Image (cartoon, rainbow, N blue to C red):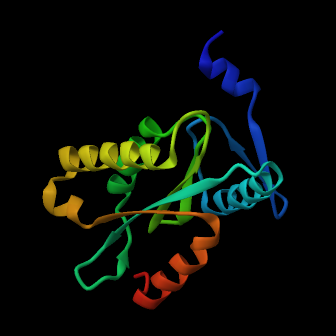
């Protein structure tokens, strides 16, 4: 049976505020669904004792402000993330148009540091090949735990999102 066929019949439904989003393996969640998944992952993590991390990808200008990604740039980043993360990880907009996130679950023998290094290097390689070194230098990759998101939010509010 093809993977597409299986994904069609085994989706996970994400409900928030009366809206439903279809989330399948390697799909990209809109911002509201991604935040819902973060909350769900936090509850799952608390019950199981198994941690997770959030990878955040964004562009910063020289003065430090987080800037929007053009649609063709975000498509490149999203495609690279889909190709780089595992089936157990989720991808979506942490802040639409500005920050792309991926929930990196800890599964099996993989250490989170190894997963992050692999994903970060893959993203840098793809960005370098498709966008060049000047554009790639603007990208930042932040790995944090759920409780560190508040500090991240405080930091981005201090430098402003354009």
The quadrant of the image that shows the C terminus is bottom left
Task: Between residue 162 and residue 44, name the one nearer to us.
Answer: 44
Question: What is the count of numbered marks?
Answer: 0
Residue 140 relative to residue 12: left or right: left
Task: Between residue 125 and residue 76, name the one nearer to us.
Answer: 125
Q: Residue furthest bottom?
A: 158
Which residue is at 25% across, 67% downward?
Answer: 138
The quadrant of the image that shows the N terminus is top right
Q: Is residue 39 above or below residue 159?
A: above
Q: Is residue 114 above or below residue 54?
A: above
Name which quarter of the figure residue 133 lies in: bottom left
Name which quarter of the figure residue 4 lies in: top right
Which residue is at 51% across, 48% downward?
Answer: 112
Which residue is at 66% across, 18% downward?
Answer: 5
Residue 98: image location, x then y, percent: 44, 68
Residue 14: image location, x then y, percent: 77, 49
Q: Is residue 75 above or below residue 148?
A: above
Residue 24 relative to residue 85: left or right: right
Which residue is at 20% across, 52% downward?
Answer: 131
Residue 50: image location, x then y, percent: 71, 49
Q: Residue furthest top?
A: 1
Q: Is residue 8 above or below residue 50?
A: above
Q: Residue furthest left?
A: 133
Residue 25: image location, x then y, percent: 61, 35
């Amino acid at each position: 049976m093809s993977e597409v066929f299986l994904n069609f019949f085994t989706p996970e439904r994400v409900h928030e505020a009366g809206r439903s989003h279809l989330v399948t393996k390697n799909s990209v969640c809109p911002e509201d669904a991604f935040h819902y998944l973060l909350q769900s992952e936090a509850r799952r993590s608390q019950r199981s004792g198994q941690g997770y991390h959030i990878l955040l990808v964004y562009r910063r200008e020289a003065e430090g402000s987080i800037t929007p990604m053009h649609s063709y740039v975000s498509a490149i980043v999203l495609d690279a993330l889909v190709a780089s993360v595992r089936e157990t990880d989720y991808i979506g907009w942490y802040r639409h148009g500005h920050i792309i996130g991926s929930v990196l679950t800890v599964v099996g023998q993989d250490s989170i540091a190894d997963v992050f290094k692999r994903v970060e290097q893959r993203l840098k390689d793809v960005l370098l090949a498709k966008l060049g070194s000047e554009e790639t230098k603007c990208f930042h990759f932040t790995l944090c735990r759920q409780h560190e998101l508040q500090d991240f939010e405080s930091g981005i509010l201090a430098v402003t999102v354009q």
